[in-house]
């Protein structure tokens, strides 16, 4: 079965030259990620993992090279089109959860579907299904401040999945979690990956997380050092 | 959904939002009350001017306007009187003989207009008879009675029953003097008026100036409906083309000046208030945007476009104004309601006000239009003030969300 390529980067470079000494955060990255992957991007601090993920997610522009998501070259999109593209194609999970604090768990998950103008029935069914899938069926109407870090991150995963994106990008999703919550979250992500064929790309330092990945891309000094498929 | 999000966002920092709501409310309250006070003052001023001085309209010989000489009386006053009496829009009128001269005692003299009035008709037209502070309004049978203003009485050192000497020209330009007895002292709301006018019986003045008693220099007319003043004025003017017929607005142009002056000061006040509001709102909303930078970046990352972000910030601002605005309008409405009936007594400053012909009791009044205008202005101000913070929000880079913390 020829899997679809969902992410393709071509000759990606990123130089931060706001300061006097330019920082070459990414120096020539060419990777392809196909549908259904469960891929970790690993590397020491400052190696360029976040920069790479931000560029792949269309949150930052490369200095050179291009990113093609599901056939669409991101550099061809205007700012508002890019936001719409992210809304429909990319799910984000952030290190510090970043839920909307004034909305409940349910409303947070529903939010992007509202932006997509999905109907009420579809929204509430999918919200319920996703919150159940991440084990939060009893926390629908709870605001983020009343949830633990692990619970917030599970809401974030449900939120990222809600608009049915092509893949989920997660920058150090477990960095703020204890080991139980980390294991719990990875179980959920791995299950969604296996049962629903959801593509996950996440960065991490954590050896326990790296062990769960099925493909490990090591980055050092802005370059891919190794790319191992287990 | 944008509404729900905006609504919840404004209550994240309750204290800050309350401060904004309260300042909008208080500001509108004060502003509307000043407006109503101003409106009451204008109305008072106009009514006072009509009741004391101008009536609704007056008729003169056109030449009398520039040169107040006795010989410029109105020709054929009987036809004018008939016209006035038969016009259904006219309520009442009085006729006057006017002269000018000097009122004097052994102590000193004072230049005045001498108003020869039909004492019974005048009672119906002006409020002079109600403004006496001492004595009586032309008691029956007393010849050569005179009413003078309080300040003039003081200056001349006269009391009720004192004698004064009036000096003026008769119709042949001969200097005439006559002794009058002060039988009443009056005080209106207009100190200038009191200082310049004395009142005598028309019959006395006619006799002393050698004019027939039927002479008229001035008609003072009241119409039934003040709204109809201008149309009635035009109608009478057409019926009496040789006379000069003028409404109160033309007769005392200072009235219009007063109105435009106080209107101007009101615009200035409103502008200052709105400017303060603009800066207050910009400051508050900018703070609200800057402390939410990360969240706004996240919203853009997960797919909320710039238009929606922009409107969310505008909506948040508008909501604050929509809470504060009605509170202020309600407070103003209550305050105006409470004070309009009995008025606000300014007698502490009364003497100063009288110099300008302003009554000492102001009855604040405000029409619906003013409430709506101010309400609308607040909404507009809020929207305008939110544009800058909203633009700031839109300009944020979503990448900040991932990078921070
Ligand atoms: N906005 C920026 N301006 C300047 N330099 C930056 C900026 N963002 C990142 N860098 C630099 O780029 C390099 C790569 O940073 P990046 O955050 O991508 O690394 P990382 O692998 O995610 O590190 P960590 O594991 O600590 O999160 C670093 O040297 C960093 O200092
Ligand atoms: Mg990083």
Image (cartoon, helix red, strand yellow):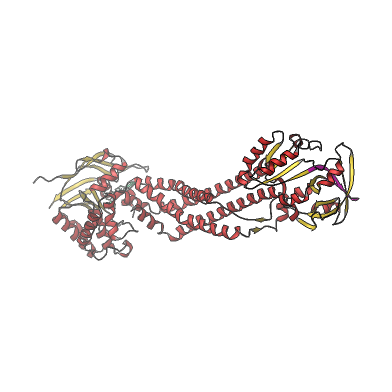
Say which residue appears at 63% left-offset and 58% top-offset.
B343
Principal SS element in the magenta part? strand
Q: Is residue A44 visible?
A: no
Foreground pick, B161 / A87:
B161
Say which residue appears at 64% left-offset and 58% top-offset.
B344
The image shows residue B61 at horizontal and vertical percentages of 75, 36
Work out which residue is located at the far right of the displayed protein and give it: B106
Q: Position of B255 compared to A20: left or right?
A: right
Foreground pick, B266 / B385:
B266
Q: Quadrant of residue B252?
A: top right
The image shows residue A180 at horizontal and vertical percentages of 22, 65
Quadrant holding the C terminus of chain B: bottom left
Whether the magenta-drawn stretch holds residue A165 is answered as no
Say which residue appears at 35% left-offset and 45% top-offset.
B307
Q: Position of B405 compared to B357: left or right?
A: left
Q: Position of B248 compared to A163: left or right?
A: right
Whether the magenta-drawn stretch holds residue B109 is answered as yes
The image shows residue B28 at horizontal and vertical percentages of 53, 54
Foreground pick, A28 / B52:
B52
Chain part drawn in magenta: B97-111
Q: Is residue B261 visible?
A: yes
Foreground pick, B375 / A33:
B375
The image shows residue B249 at horizontal and vertical percentages of 66, 42
Q: Quadrant of residue B102?
A: top right
């Amino acid at each position: 079965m020829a899997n679809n390529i969902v992410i393709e980067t071509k000759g990606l470079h990123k130089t931060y030259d706001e300061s006097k000494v330019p920082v070459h955060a990414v120096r020539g990255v060419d990777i392809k990620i196909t549908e259904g992957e469960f891929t970790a991007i690993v590397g020491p601090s400052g190696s360029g993992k976040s920069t790479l993920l931000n560029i792949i997610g269309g949150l930052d522009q490369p200095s050179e090279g291009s990113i093609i998501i599901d056939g669409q070259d991101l550099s061809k999109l205007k700012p508002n089109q890019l936001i719409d593209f992210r809304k429909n194609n990319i799910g984000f999970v952030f290190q510090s959860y970043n839920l909307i604090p004034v909305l409940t768990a349910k409303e947070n998950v529903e939010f992007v579907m509202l932006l997509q103008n999905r109907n009420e029935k579809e929204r509430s069914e999918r919200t319920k299904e996703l919150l159940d899938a991440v084990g939060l069926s009893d926390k629908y109407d709870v605001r983020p401040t009343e949830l633990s870090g692990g619970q917030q991150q599970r809401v974030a995963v449900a939120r990222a999945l809600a608009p049915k994106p092509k893949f989920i990008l997660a920058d150090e999703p477990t960095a703020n979690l204890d080991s139980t919550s980390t294991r719990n979250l990875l179980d959920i992500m791995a299950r969604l990956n296996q049962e629903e064929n959801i593509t996950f790309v996440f960065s991490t330092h954590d050896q326990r997380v790296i062990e769960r990945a099925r493909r490990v891309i090591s980055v050092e000094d802005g370059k891919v050092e190794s790319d191992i498929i287990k | 959904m944008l509404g729900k999000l905006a609504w919840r966002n404004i209550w994240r920092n309750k204290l800050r939002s309350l401060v904004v709501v309260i300042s909008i409310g208080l500001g509108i309250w004060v502003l509307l009350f000043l407006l109503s006070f101003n409106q009451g003052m204008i109305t008072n001023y106009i009514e006072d001017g009509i009741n004391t001085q101008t009536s609704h309209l007056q008729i003169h010989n056109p030449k009398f306007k520039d040169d107040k000489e006795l010989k410029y009386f109105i020709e054929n006053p009987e036809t004018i009187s008939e016209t006035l009496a038969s016009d259904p829009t006219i309520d009442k009128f009085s006729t006057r003989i006017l002269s000018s001269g000097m009122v004097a005692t052994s102590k000193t003299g004072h230049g005045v207009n001498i108003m020869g009035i039909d004492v019974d008709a005048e009672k119906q037209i002006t409020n002079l008879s109600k403004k006496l502070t001492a004595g009586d309004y032309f008691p029956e049978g007393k010849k050569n009675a005179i009413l003078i203003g309080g300040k003039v009485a003081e200056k001349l050192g006269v009391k009720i029953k004192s004698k004064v000497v009036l000096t003026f020209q008769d119709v042949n330009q001969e200097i005439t003097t006559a002794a009058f007895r002060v039988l009443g002292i009056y005080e209106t709301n207009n100190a200038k008026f009191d200082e310049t006018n004395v009142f005598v019986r028309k019959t006395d003045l006619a006799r002393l100036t050698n004019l027939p008693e039927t002479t008229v220099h001035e008609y003072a007319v009241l119409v039934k409906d003040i709204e109809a003043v201008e149309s009635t004025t035009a109608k009478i003017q057409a019926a009496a083309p040789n006379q000069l017929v003028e409404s109160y607005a033309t007769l005392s142009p200072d009235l219009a000046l007063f109105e435009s002056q106080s209107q101007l000061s009101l615009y200035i006040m409103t502008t200052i208030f709105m400017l303060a509001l603009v800066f207050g709102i910009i400051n508050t909303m900018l703070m609200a945007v800057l402390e939410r930078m990360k969240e706004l970046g996240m919203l853009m990352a997960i797919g909320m476009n710039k238009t929606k972000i922009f409107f969310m910030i505008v909506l948040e601002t508008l909501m604050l104004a929509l809470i504060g605005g009605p509170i202020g309008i309600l407070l103003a409405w209550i305050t105006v309601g409470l004070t309009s009936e009995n008025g606000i007594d300014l007698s502490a400053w009364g003497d100063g006000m009288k110099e300008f012909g302003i009554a000492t009791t102001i009855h604040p009044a405000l029409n619906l239009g003013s409430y709506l205008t101010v309400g609308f202005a607040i909404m507009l101000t809020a929207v305008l003030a939110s544009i800058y913070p909203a633009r700031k929000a839109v300009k944020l880079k979503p990448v900040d969300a991932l990078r921070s913390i």
